[in-house]
Image (cartoon, rainbow, N blue to C red):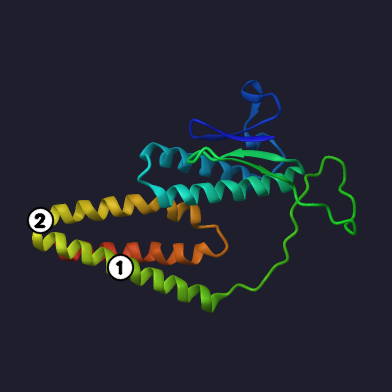
């Protein structure tokens, strides 16, 4: 099976190369959450691809998210998934996880699900990382805005804040569900909100 992007949609294709029949993930028994995540990734990947080579950070997050979704897809479908990075063009083949011999056999037609042991949420460490990311974003945004407002004009400072916000938003959106990175993402998103309040206060 091959994971592809057509326009801003994710599609899955069987063997046969470019002429293979493509199927919308929502039509397969992979779960609504995974199908929705695949389409969200495809939309962001298409947007990042259009920005060119300048969006290196966003491109790396898109690549990491794509490999993660390909791994989930291989686990659910129980088959090998071929994934071509939409940013770098690197091809990756993801194998399904080996089946535990001690586990009971799957009923016919039931997709194979990856088994994950639930672990306690690291609230203290996670919130510490979130707070650090929020402070970093607030300080950086306010320093940029203050300098531009003092040296040039307030409208240029607002424009710079808009560019910075638009540049990191795709990375924040993709990283919101990654187990470790999401703490920094939540903190950076909160820092953006607080920073914008400061930007408007400085400019106006």
The span from disc 2 to disc 1 (Cα, nearest Å) is 20 Å
Residue 69, x across and y down, in percent: 61, 47
Measured from the top left, where is residue 89 in percent x and y? 52, 37
Tags 2 and 1 touching, CB below 8 Å: no
Q: Would residue 139 be found to the left or right of residue 104 on screen?
A: left
Instruction: Give the side of residue 203 with respect to residue 12, left or right.
Output: left
Helix or strand or loop: what does disc 1 sit on? helix
Mark 2, residues whose alpha carbon is within 10 Å: few (<14), some, or many (≥20)?
some
Please indicate whether residue 110 sits to the left or right of residue 122 in the image: right
User: Pointer 1: residues within 10 angstroms few (<14), some, or many (20+)?
Assistant: many
Instruction: Determine the residue positioned at 64% across, 45% down.
Output: 70
Looking at the rendered image, the quarter that the N terminus falls into is top right
Q: Residue at x 64, y 20 (%)?
A: 19
**Which tag, 2 or 1, sits closer to the chain's start?**
1
* Residue occupied by mark 1: 138
Q: Which one is nearer the viewer's eye here, 68 or 11?
A: 68
- Taking the spot 44% from the left edge, 70% from the top edge, the residue there is 130
Which residue is found at the position 73% from the left and 40% from the top?
80
Residue found at the far top of this picture: 19
Q: x and y percent of residue 162 in the render?
A: 26, 52
Residue 153 disc label: 2
Q: Left or right: where does residue 148 sit relative to residue 122?
A: left
168 vs 39, nearest the viewer: 168
Q: Looking at the image, which is closer to me, 20 or 191?
A: 20
**Residue 196: which disc?**
none
């Amino acid at each position: 099976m091959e994971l592809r992007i057509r326009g801003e949609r994710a599609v899955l294709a069987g063997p046969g190369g470019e002429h293979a029949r493509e199927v919308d993930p929502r039509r397969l028994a992979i779960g609504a959450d995974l199908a929705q995540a695949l389409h969200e990734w495809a939309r962001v990947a298409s947007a990042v691809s259009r920005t060119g080579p300048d969006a290196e950070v966003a491109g790396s997050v898109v690549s990491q998210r794509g490999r993660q979704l390909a791994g989930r897809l291989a686990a659910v479908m129980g088959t090998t998934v071929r994934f071509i990075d939409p940013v770098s063009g690197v091809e990756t083949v993801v194998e399904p996880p080996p089946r535990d011999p001690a586990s009971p056999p799957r009923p016919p037609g039931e997709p194979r699900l990856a088994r994950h042991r639930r672990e306690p949420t690291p609230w203290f460490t996670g919130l510490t990382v979130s707070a650090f990311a929020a402070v970093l974003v607030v300080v950086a945004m306010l320093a940029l805005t203050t300098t531009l407002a003092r040296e040039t004009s307030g409208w240029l400072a607002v424009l710079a804040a808009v560019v910075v916000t638009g540049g990191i938003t795709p990375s924040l959106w993709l990283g919101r569900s990654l187990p470790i990175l999401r703490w920094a993402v939540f903190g950076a998103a909160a820092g953006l909100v607080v920073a914008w309040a400061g930007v408007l206060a400085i400019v106006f």
